Amino acid sequence: MAVPAPASGFAPRSLAAWLELLELKQLPVNEVVRAKTLKMLSNGASATAMVPVILDDPALVLLLFREANRALARYDREAHTLEHAISLLGVGRAQKLLEKAETLAADHPHVEAYRLVLLRSQHAAAQARMWADGTGLWPGEEVFWSTLLAAAPLWLLQLEAGDAAHRLDVLRAEESAIGKQHALELFGCDPLELSAILAERWLLPQMSRLSWQRSATGTLRQWIALEHSAHLDEAPTIPTRELTELCHHPALIVALANALAIEADWNWYSRRCLRVLSIAATACRRPLSTLITYCHQTAAAISREFADSGLPTPGAKLLGQWNEARLWAKEKPPAPKPAANDAGQPEQATGPSAAERALAANVKKLRTPTEVSGVREALELGMNALHDGVGFHRVAVMFVKPGTRELQTVLSAGAEQAPALRQFRYSVQQSQLFTQLLAKPICLLLDADNRAKYTPHLPDTFRAAIGCDNFALMSVFAGERPVALIYADTAPALLAAGSRQHTLFKQVCQQVSQTLAQLG
């Protein structure tokens, strides 16, 4: 049986009314995933074999967890993984549960938005598991399932109050932020308070429930302190024991991963997203640049997994510089007709800028190694992407000569007035800093925060050649072999750590390395 669309004419409800409506409701499951799972149950498949199939539908995961935890509640225990939940239920009980489960009507008006919030939770769970497995600070499997299910109350709210959720998104796009009062006016209660209560009554995993509690995840003041503790290229400095203990709590990671997934859905390059990444870097005891790199790789992996879903995936949004606020332009009054130019003709509507087109074209070719003739062209594509696409003022590619380990500028853009940079040559062995940069793919951003630390280690000839004390420098590799150092600056403008240009600089350099590795 399919879950029908909600009645039209949505009206706000009190907290008590929402709880009465939602507490006993089950989310509709994916018909295809349900059919596959039932077939596997009939064929005697193990719980371990069924997990990857069921994972394609978080609503089905939720159904099995809720039923298993309901049975365990009397013993004050809970299921920690999906495999555990299936084993506890047994084949017969799981089959009956799936056979009775409802599916979502194809004509439901919010089906697309519902699929998107499910994908958001799957992205959050993948990030949380990466943080846990990469640091060993939290139990990876428990954190994964807790993160996946933490936002489950919001999934159902998307179906039952999709119009209000849509309007809340429009308000965020129009006003850049939304407050509690906005939500109260649209829903009649605070959705976060409602979600916290439903998480308890639905018997979600303990870490899912605690992720809604500030007492477990930290106050706003503590989050700000964690953000400020992060460093770009060094491990964080956590100032107090209280914050250190907070970072050990798995509920913080569950909350942060879901917060990151929300902000990444809106804009990976926003200040709000960078704040969440900074807090996560502190909690993981990792440099911010390292955490960002791994988060981007995780987003790319999720995108490959859901490439055929037809949904805008986290990796696609990252590469395409997605900005959710732009999508709501149709909610605003129509713009006035374009003014005529000097020739009396109306100005053309603006599309992607020339820089955006240049970045996309060069990166697209880099990602198709069969169209790249060799090492020099790969380096040139990277240089053009940074100069013409990202907007760096000067870009120079310093090739590492095999055998002699001598650096020599072979390509440059925007350096017409800097002959010393275009003709730069230097023996790597004379600089410990250059040797370290060529030992593994490292990005050095020289700015006011680290200038005193790194400037003394820069060769005098290099400093004279660039005539700049704010720049980015990163090595590119072909497998294990260093190929070049790529230099870029934005002088006279400042290049800030964590900025869009800084992030794209690292991504383009990483793409050049991937292309070089494929070229052999």
Image (cartoon, grey):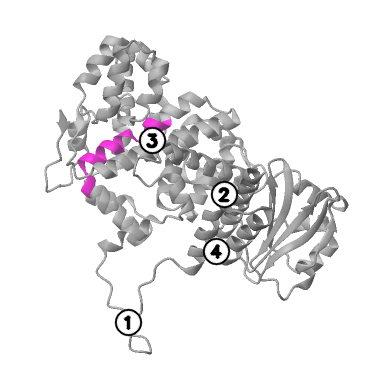
Q: Quadrant of residue 328?
A: bottom left
Q: Is residue 353 magenta?
A: no
CA separation, marks 2 and 1?
Answer: 42 Å
Callout in the foreground (4, 2): 2
Q: Amino acid at mark 2?
A: Thr
Seen at 46% across and 36% down, the residue is: 217
Residue placed under numbered mark 2 in the picture: 370
Residue placed under numbered mark 4 in the picture: 389
CA separation, marks 4 and 1?
Answer: 28 Å
Q: Earlier in the sequence, mark 4 or mark 2?
A: 2
Callout in the foreground (3, 4): 4
Q: Is residue 358 above or below residue 237?
A: below
Looking at the rendered structure, the secondary structure element under dot 3 is loop
Callout in the foreground (3, 1): 1
CB contact under 8 Å: marks 4 and 1 = no
Where residue 199 appears, x then y in whole percent?
32, 30
Where residue 242 appears, x then y in whole percent?
57, 35
Is 212 on the left or on the right of 103, as rendered?
right
Seen at 31% across and 53% down, the residue is: 169
For disc 2, the neighbor class at 10 Å (few under 14, some 14 to 19, many from 20) is few
Q: Earlier in the sequence, mark 3 or mark 1?
A: 3
CA separation, marks 3 and 1?
Answer: 52 Å
Residue placed under numbered mark 1 in the picture: 346
Q: Which mark is residue 212?
A: 3
Looking at the rendered structure, the secondary structure element under dot 4 is helix
Whether residue 269 is visible, yes or no, is yes
Q: Which mark is residue 264?
A: none
Q: Amino acid at mark 1?
A: Pro
CA separation, marks 3 and 4?
Answer: 41 Å
Q: Magenta stretch: dominant SS?
A: helix
